[in-house]
């Protein structure tokens, strides 16, 4: 039982950290989200809200292992040229009218099984090269990469960080999760295609002078063979319902056994900030829960009828755009667990927090990656993105709610 002072301290630390998560930095001080997570976690222990031994129990190790292992696997594929090779084969050997659906479904499919941020990193340069060659305005195709990678990532536990977190907390088997949300991703990609096609016609097609396509970086097939085989084995493990963290960790460990591969290059590809952010977030939310946050959130849920799927979806979508989707998932997990059928609550949480990422430029890390990578050749404004993001988000969330209600 916490003292009144510790209870107040827990809520102050929690509130200050979530202010940084929402704003991206602390007002007047250069503290980013991972920094706030480290500071908040440290304060939760230093002030006695969490004892050091107790703090370890709040860290979900399976989530961290799965996230880290998938980063290692994806980094190995990236360094071997896998994404560049796939994107170059699929995107650049097309007629202009086929480019949009190909970009959408390639981005969506790759993001369904791999971390969508890396997919965006690989796809943007190839899309820019293809649009230069085909004399097309790049804006619709860049928006296609961002929105499709978010939509595709909803399909599986390993599609994005928040799904990894939800998969660990919910215990939903990989295949069951995919069967529940895979159809939402497929329908969502078709919606994305329709909306962007309409906007592309409205914006006009040709806008840049034709240019020669940059040659693809040669792929070392021998170097690519091992990570491709291991990725296939890991995905097979997921489909056979081997615990995802174990399957991914085994694959990542196998990739690190190499006579020619420099592991430092792989480590440099890891998003250490995200791993730190997750670890700190576990302790921040754990301290707040010990102070009674989960009980308060359940009271809010009952008062506002948040266990009705449509209301829950809207609340999660809004929170995900205010404080980012991973902190939102950590915050509202008592709502999901409080559903009459908790599995349904977790699936709605995964669906809403992921698809909400398409609403605005800052709704998803994938969106920011696309915009930053393309900045030199194509500036994407807030309204440019919103013209696509708003209808895509509303329509896909509607599909998600209807599908899960029918399936439930």
Image (cartoon, helix red, strand yellow):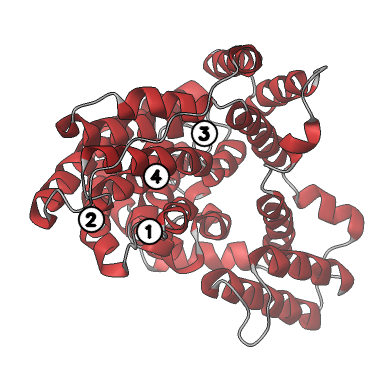
Q: Nearer the viewer, mark 4 or mark 1?
A: 4
Q: Is residue 252 left or right of residue 83?
A: right
**Which numbered disc flags the more N-terminal residue, 2 or 4?**
4
What residue did someone put label 2 on? 388
- Residue 273 percent coordinates (x, y): 69, 55
Closer to the camera, 160 or 104?
A: 104
Residue 395: x %, y % from top left: 21, 49
Q: Which mark is residue 157?
A: 3
Callout 1 touching callout 3 (CB < 8 Å): no
* Upstream in sequence: badge 4 or badge 1: 4
Q: Is residue 408 visible?
A: no
Q: Which mark is residue 150?
A: 4
Q: Are marks 4 and 1 in contact (CB under 8 Å)?
A: no
**Quarter of the N terminus within the rendering:** bottom right
Disc 2, SS: helix
Q: Which residue is mark 1?
A: 317
Q: Is residue 377 above or below residue 109?
A: below
Disc 3 and disc 4: Cα gap in Å? 13 Å
């Amino acid at each position: 039982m916490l003292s009144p002072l510790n209870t107040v301290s827990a809520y102050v630390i929690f509130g200050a950290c979530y202010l940084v998560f929402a704003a991206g930095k602390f007002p007047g001080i250069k503290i980013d989200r991972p920094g706030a997570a480290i500071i908040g976690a440290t304060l939760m222990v230093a002030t006695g809200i969490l004892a050091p031994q107790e703090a370890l129990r709040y860290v979900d190790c399976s989530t961290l292992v799965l996230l880290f292992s998938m980063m290692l696997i994806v980094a190995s594929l990236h360094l071997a040229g896998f994404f560049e090779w796939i994107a170059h084969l699929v995107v650049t050997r097309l007629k202009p009218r086929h480019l949009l659906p190909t970009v959408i479904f390639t981005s969506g499919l790759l993001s369904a099984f791999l971390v969508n941020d890396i997919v965006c990193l690989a796809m943007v340069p190839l899309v820019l090269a293809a649009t230069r060659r085909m004399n097309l305005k790049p804006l619709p195709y860049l928006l296609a990469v961002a929105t499709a990678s978010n939509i595709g990532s909803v399909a599986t536990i390993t599609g994005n960080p928040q799904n990894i977190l939800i998969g660990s907390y919910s215990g939903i088997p990989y295949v069951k999760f995919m069967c529940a949300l895979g159809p939402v991703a497929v329908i969502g990609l078709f919606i994305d295609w329709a909306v962007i096609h309409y906007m592309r016609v409205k914006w006009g097609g040709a806008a840049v002078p034709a240019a020669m396509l940059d040659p693809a970086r040669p792929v070392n097939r021998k170097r690519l063979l091992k990570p491709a085989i291991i990725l296939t084995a890991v995905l097979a493990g997921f489909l056979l319902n081997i615990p995802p963290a174990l399957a991914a960790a085994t694959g990542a460990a196998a990739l690190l056994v190499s006579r020619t591969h420099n592991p430092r290059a792989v480590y440099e590809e890891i998003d250490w900030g995200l791993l730190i952010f997750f670890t700190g977030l576990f302790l921040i939310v754990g301290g707040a829960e010990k102070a009674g946050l989960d009980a308060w959130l359940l009271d809010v849920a009952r008062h506002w009828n948040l266990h009705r799927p449509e209301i829950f979806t809207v609340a999660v979508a809004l929170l995900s755009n205010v404080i980012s989707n991973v902190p939102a998932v950590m915050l509202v997990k008592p709502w999901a667990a409080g559903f009459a059928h908790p599995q349904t609550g977790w699936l709605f949480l995964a669906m809403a927090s992921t698809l909400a990422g398409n609403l605005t430029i800052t709704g998803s890390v994938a969106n920011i990656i696309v915009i930053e990578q393309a900045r030199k050749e194509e500036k994407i404004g807030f309204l440019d993105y919103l013209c696509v993001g708003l209808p895509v988000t509303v329509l896909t969330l509607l599909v998600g709610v209807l599908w899960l209600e029918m399936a439930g």
